[in-house]
Image (cartoon, rainbow, N blue to C red):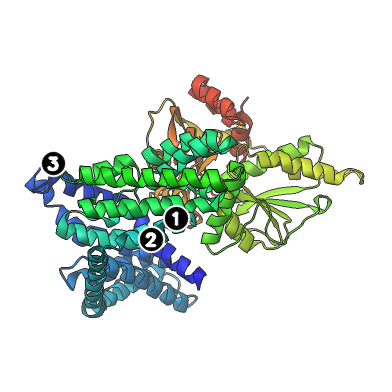
Amino acid sequence: MKERVQKFGRFLSGMVMPNIGAFIAWGLIAALFISDGWLPNETIASMVGPMLSYLLPILIGYTGGKAVGGQKGAVAGALATLGAIASTESTMFIGAMICGPLGGWCIKRFDKQMEGHIPAGFEMVVNNFSVGIIGGVLAVLAIFFIGPACVFLTYWLGEGVKALVELGVLPLTAVLVEPAKVLFLNNAINHGIFTPIGTEQALEAGKSILFMIESNPGPGLGLLLAYCVAGKGETRSSAGAAAIIQFVGGIHEIYFPYVLMNPIVILAPMIGNICGIFTLSALGGGLKGPASPGSILAEMMLTPKDCYFANIAGIAVAAVVSFVIAVFLLKMFGKDASLEEAQQQVAASKAASKGQAASGTAAAGVSVAPKDVKKIVFACDAGMGSSAMGATMLRNKLKDAGITDIEVIHFPVSEIPGDCQIVVTHHELSGRAAQRAPQARIIPIKNFMGAPEYDKLVTEMVEGRKGGAEPAPAPAAEVQTVETPAAESGEMLEKKNIVLGCKPVTPEEAIKACGRRMVESGYVDEGYIQGMLDREASFSVAIGNHVAIPHGTNDVKPTIKRTGIVVMTYPEGIDWNGDKVKLVVGIAAKGDEHLEILGRIVAIASTEEDTDRIVTDANAEDLFKKLNGIE
């Protein structure tokens, strides 16, 4: 039951989260340009209504349909959502959350029934007409059934929230919110429940306190500052920087390890948030739209002009109360635990929140003797980028240690072979890897380029082989990368696609820049860019050592025309969701042609210092030669 609830919550959040930028845009436009905003402008403010009534629900429906039924499901979901919108003047967020997945499910079922029954040459006709007919039928049904039902449900949800506020018990929601955040259910609660209802309230009242229940940075700030005062060892020295990242950057996940190392301190942010919500309720605080991420900057930008005192007070009270309680708990019950251990617990909790199990460095119950290891698999989301580089690094380390009888290969996490003994993967994918390969030992890592686990694993393999017969040398193909002729490599990386000295941008902008160059060079179709963005949304392409390798998901591989590489340098660095990236290598590969270049990236960027030196000193000719193996 718990797993089903978690899965349902994650699915709700998954429909809203990819579109949170649109919600923020709506909130900012409303805050600035409506009649009582900071810069009233009737023309610009005319967008506020259509964005809320049409754009946001259709985006949610489209995303929900795509999650269930792919691109065709997305279109059917959007059509069905439009039917719900047309049925009423109420905002159809809940209707979109029903219609979107319903459209995707109907398309998926239709495609399954038609599989193998479509005459050759009629595939496009059947695909297009099926989407149009199914989407149109669902839109009509939504007008008469789904829309009216959602109006009724929305009314009673709104009445329930009002009742909580009037009864003065809204602060008690923090009792559930704070523990849920540490279990990585924060987005499911915030964007799956509070954001849709809060948006309804903001439409009527111009603000909503619901936008601040989960996003308030005060409770986490108080907890981290308490560690600065009463923490021990590494936790104390690291808490200050973590507090800045959490409060200013809005990355609340950074304080979760500090809770997991001393679980009793969860009482601090819990009680702090209760007091903060009480203060906001008493003073009439709230935001114009959802603050994502939950940083002080986002909170202030979305604060109505008459709510600054209330919102600042709510954040401050939450921080102070959380700080005082956390200091007391740490002094009375705190234990000295390493941050690395706690971060491993975070990885395990994150995997558990996905309904899967990953513990420490091995899957539960799996024990593999080092001398018996014959196959190690590196797994990433797509199986063509970060995992390929990690496999190259470990293969080289094993070779240097004299071990040549272990096959090191890379696969998508969904296609891990059943005969491997060890799977190395990013900690965020460890749960999926354990589910896919229950027979294997799972080693979660955070950095494909320079994980300390590599050296530990090599040492373990060496020690396990001591005293035994020397392993027979493996064929060269098992321990060496296949050399690609310079001419072919040159075609993969053309000089025109080496761009130096780029100014810092967002990760999304960097990915789009790579994608546009790939399209212009004839490597891929336009749809590949969205696949690159989807890849980043599901799993970061920043692989450590200041390197990122944007590439598409498996779904967009058919859009690749020929293998091509794009290289862009960012000397000032990009903040890539907490990682610094200076070298961006965009990849589009039909087969394994790109592996040689990935191996060369490993060779020239094996440390952060190596990458920094390459980015600072190299010119286009240098990169062209080094990455194409000309020198």
Q: How many marks?
A: 3
Secondary element under disc 1, as helix, strand or loop, is helix
Query: Of the residues shown, which amino acid type is indicated by label 3?
Result: Trp
Residue at the image position 31 percent from the left and 64 percent from the top: 61
Q: Are marks 2 and 3 in contact (CB under 8 Å)?
A: no
Secondary element under disc 2, as helix, strand or loop, is helix
Q: Are marks 1 and 2 in contact (CB under 8 Å)?
A: yes
Q: Quadrant of residue 75?
A: bottom left
- Regarding residue 527, the answer to whether it shows in the image is no
The numbered mark, 3 or 1, whose residue comes first in the sequence reads 3
Who is closer to the viewer here, 278 or 346? Answer: 278
Q: Are marks 3 and 1 in contact (CB under 8 Å)?
A: no
| Residue farthest to the top, as pictured | 617
Question: Please, is residue 230 above or below residue 156 in the view?
Answer: above
- Which residue bears the numbered disc 2? 189
- Which residue bears the numbered disc 3? 38
Q: What percent of the width, then of the height, locates residue 22?
A: 28, 51
Q: Which mark is residue 181?
A: 1
Q: Which mark is residue 58?
A: none
- Regarding residue 142, the answer to whether it shows in the image is yes
User: Is 75 positioned to the left or the right of 580 in the image?
Assistant: left
Quote the CA–CA distance across marks 3 and 1.
33 Å
User: Is 285 positioned to the left or the right of 444 in the image?
Assistant: left
